[in-house]
Image (cartoon, rainbow, N blue to C red):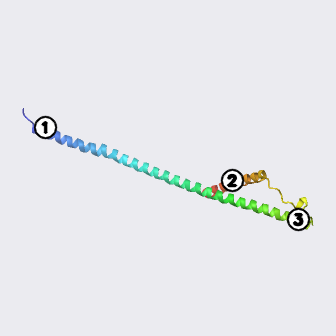
Amino acid sequence: MLIDWFTVTAQIVNFLILVYLLKRFLYQPIVRHMNEREEKIANRLQQASDKRAEAQRQIDEFQHKQEEIEQQSAQKLEKAEEEAQKRLKKRSILDNQGPGSPQNRPIPRSKEVRRCLGSDARFRSKDLGYSIWREDSG
């Protein structure tokens, strides 16, 4: 059995040319495309993480503003009640009525009335806080 060295050499050269062409025109574009896709996915994940952090920051800021508004509304409600008591006492003194008269007695604070006033104030503070948040983010 004779080996034709010219044919073996030609086949080795043909195989090396085929490997080079496949690497150049098939393998490198696929690898490049996969790398680009990995970069895009990593960028999207980073953007999503950034947006999630920003949303959480805005939620925290909104809740903080809402708590401040609720505190302010509670203070204003308490101040209004004190002012009403002062005016009632001043009015009874000006009318020269005795301390036992029905008009001089303090206004009874019904739990129901306070609850209604408080829930209305909370609703208004949430609405105001939401509008402030929309103005800041818009």
Q: CA distance from mark 2 to mark 1?
A: 88 Å
Q: Quadrant of the N terminus?
A: top left
Residue at the disc numbered 3:
91
Query: Residue shown at 78%/52% (left/top)?
Result: 113
Query: Residue shown at 78%/61% (left/top)?
Result: 80
Report which quarter residue 3 is drawn in.
Answer: top left
Residues at marks 2 and 3 touching, judged by CB atoms closer than 8 Å:
no
Q: Give the label, 3 or 1, closer to the camera.
A: 3
Q: Amino acid at mark 3?
A: Arg
Query: Residue shown at 76%/63% (left/top)?
Result: 79
Residue 112 visible somewhere in the drawing = yes
Q: Counting residues from the N terminus, which is met first, the one under dot 2 or under dot 1?
A: 1
Residue at the disc numbered 2:
127
Front in this rendered view, residue 43 or 69: 69
Residue at the disc numbered 1:
7
Query: Residue shown at 64%/58% (left/top)?
Result: 65
- Residue 105 location in percent, x, y? 86, 60
Q: CA distance from mark 2 to mark 3?
A: 36 Å
Q: Counting residues from the N terminus, which is met first, the one under dot 3 or under dot 1?
A: 1
Horizontal arrangement in the rendering, residue 45 relative to residue 11 (left or right)? right
Q: Amino acid at mark 2?
A: Asp
Q: Give the label, 2 or 1, closer to the camera.
A: 2
Report which quarter residue 72 is drawn in.
Answer: bottom right
